[in-house]
Amino acid sequence: MESVTCEIQYSVAARALVVAAALATGALVFVMPLGVALRVALLAWVALLAIRALRTLDEIAAVRLDEEGAVFVRDALGGWRAGRIREGSCVFPWLTVVRWRPEGSRWDRTVLLLPSMVDAAAFRGLRVLLRWGPPQPGDVPGDVPGDVPRDVPRDVPRGQALPFTQ
């Protein structure tokens, strides 16, 4: 598998998720013991963020990811932007969040993908690349539970104490 391209389609479920999150956040702000002016300002902020999130869902038409961690995002007008996958991407059966940073940008971007938004085979390939992709800079053996660091002798059974060395 060299690269995977997901063509993103309109999704009512994604919009419902954004609206539900905004309504839940608004309800929390409403019941907080805050002054009226602060409450109105926070509710307006939540509404603006929800509108921005809904608009962002329509801005991305496709995502291409390769084995090296490079990501290419096509906007609704057909232009491609290149970037790199960043920490914070996550994969669940019902949701995939692609966290990426465009080349030359200081800020990360997020692409929200639900199974109803993309082809099933492409979605599966994207999830595999995100979950089992190449090691990132800073990854070291021993960071993963059950992984044995390179400096541990392989003949020592797991769970057995290693001899103390100075």
Image (tube, rainbow, N blue to C red):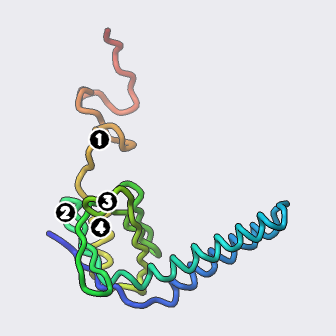
Which is more N-terminal, label 2 or label 3? 2
- In the picture, residue 71 is in which quadrant? bottom left
Which is more N-terminal, label 4 or label 1? 4
Q: Which mark is residue 67?
A: 2
- In the picture, residue 10 is in which quadrant? bottom left
Above or below residue 159? Residue 103 is below
Density class for disc 4 (Cα within 10 Å; few <14, some 14-19, many ≥20) is some
- In the picture, residue 73 is in which quadrant? bottom left
Residue at screen point 41% across, 71% down: 96
Q: Amino acid at mark 1?
A: Gly
| Cα–Cα gap, marks 4 and 3 | 26 Å
The residue to which callout 4 is attached is: 128
The image position of residue 97, as x and y in percent, is 42, 68
Q: Secondary structure at mark 3?
A: loop
Q: Which mark is residue 105?
A: 3
Position of the C terminus by quadrant = top left
